[in-house]
Image: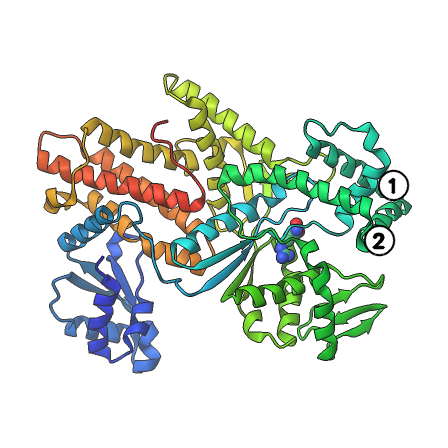
Amino acid sequence: MLDYKKIIAEELAKITNVDINELESYIEIPPNTDLGDYAFPCFRLAKELKKAPPMIANEIKEQFPENEYIEKIDVVGGYLNIYVNKLPYVSDILKSVSDNRENYGKMTIGNGKTIVIDYSAPNIAKPFHIGHLRSTVIGGALYKMYKFLGYNVVGVNHLGDWGMGICRTIAGYKMWKDEYDFSVRPIDSILAIYVRYNKIEKEDPDFKKHAVEALKLLEEGDEETTKIWKWIIDVSLADYKKIYDLIGCEFDSYNGEAFYNDKMDRVVRELEEKNLLVESEGAKVVVMDEDIPPCIIITSAGTTIYATRDLAALLYRIDNYNFDKCLYLVASEQSLHFKQVFETLSKMGYEKYASACEHIPFGLVLDEDGQKMGSRKGNAVTLEEIFNESIEKSLQIIEEKNPTLENKEEVAKLVGVGAIIFNDLANNRIKDEIFDWKQILNFAGETGPYMQYTYVRTQSILRNAGYTPKFAEIDCTKLMDAEAINVIKAIGNFDDVLVSATQKNEPSLLSRYLIDLAQSFSRFYNEHHILTEDKAVQDARLLLTDAVGIVIKEGLALLGIKCPSQM
Ligand code: ARG
């Protein structure tokens, strides 16, 4: 594909003598076409050129040579608004999509770089509940996107499979196992035990001793306790994997907290060697530079802790993956924890790796009334329940809208799952997500079903035509109307969006982009007949329709959403 940013930057470099890569990095894509196809903010050069931005803009405009790809340049304040020649632009983009039907947008910019993505990481013994939806969905999308850009991606599920949580369940199981049935849905009984244990402990704090005892036995390697522990992990994982399959999540490692049990000594040893461990109220801690609490490494009870495990995990990841980036998809509640862990790693002498670590926080999931969804009180909303409900509701809608559709169940599954995923990724991740069924499943809103519906529409247009033209057969001059150009422009921006979405670790940039693409296709479709008497016009419009379908399908797949061909 033609690289317009490069084409523009080359001319700018000749005029300004500024480094071409630097210039290229400043070029923007304006939010709407009235401001040009590309824009250059001249204030970026003001310091270097020692001139006011509007002056720079005017000088560049005057000196900008004739270029077959550039139609005109406007100066607005300190901005250059650059308009491209539409014919080569449109034909280049459509050719590129047609030539790369299976992997349009795929890149190699990540080749040779390794990214660890630590995501999902539910706590064993609890069912997979809504509290882990966001990490799983956002992490799953980033995993796919980075791979698509050529990175070597290691998806790690740092399971919460150790500590007091699971030991409450173990202790409860030992006391009450005869009262429960584990033959049908063992995870439900395991959860019921956990909830029961917590309830008692709340009223009688002394009850905690059973869990403490279980943890002690587990640490000593007691056979019976270890057996129960392993079984609980197996049952829980089997349950989680149902969800991972449903949303197409992949992991390269399931090394959870327990995996680091025999790797904690090294953390303590290295900290001691570097004189970083300080006694504080019976605990051993690392003091932080900033005004934040110290990082506890050994508790006053003499045990290691969440942070110790994260440090052990980091040393392991450094040794085994030698990562260029290590991303943690964890709710913002844990910001302090990650600050402490990264700073400790840096003090240990691993500055390079510490600065390659990044906590990627996100907001809560709230119900329609603005209340936090799900809780440990026993009314936890499991992900399985949520997905099932979404699939059921989608089926009802399909029954109403399209009762004769074949494989309604299959389609409802794709729609129901896609709706939940899209809702999670629809806004900036740091914002709280509102879980409102009416919105999530609104086929006309900015939703997953709307995106899938737009894809389906492209496919049905092509089916009605009975053919998909080849790029060589079409006449791009038939696509010079404003609506078509807008659609094609969006298609051409796909790779740019993928790059910024990964740079910012913000999949919502991709979901917003897809909504924009679908909306511009709708405008095109409403303004113009695709199937018409004029064969040349029809062919050109069909190819455009085909290209829209390709990008939507690929874009949604990167978010974890599959498209039905009819719905
Ligand atoms: N299991 C933890 C929780 O549910 C999340 C783990 C995140 N990953 C990590 N390396 N700390 O809060």
In percent of width and height, residue 354 lies at: 58, 70
Three-letter residue code for mark 1? Glu
Side (left or right) of 76 relative to 338: left
**The C terminus, quarter of image:** top left
Question: Which residue in the protein does label 1 denote?
Answer: 203
Q: Is residue 11 visible?
A: yes
Residue at horizontal 64 percent and vertical 50 percent from the top = 159
Question: How many other residues sit within 10 Å of disc 2, few (<14), some (14-19) or many (≥20)?
Answer: some
Q: Residue furthest front?
A: 223
Quarter of the rendering containing residue 84: bottom left
Give the mark nearer the N terminus: 2 vs 1: 1
**The N terminus, quarter of image:** bottom left
Q: How is the image coloured?
A: rainbow
Taking depth in this image into account, of 377 and 165 the one nearest to the observer is 165
Q: Is residue 370 visible?
A: no
In percent of width and height, residue 305 lies at: 74, 60
In percent of width and height, residue 22 lies at: 32, 73
Quarter of the rendering containing residue 320: bottom right
Label 2 element class: helix
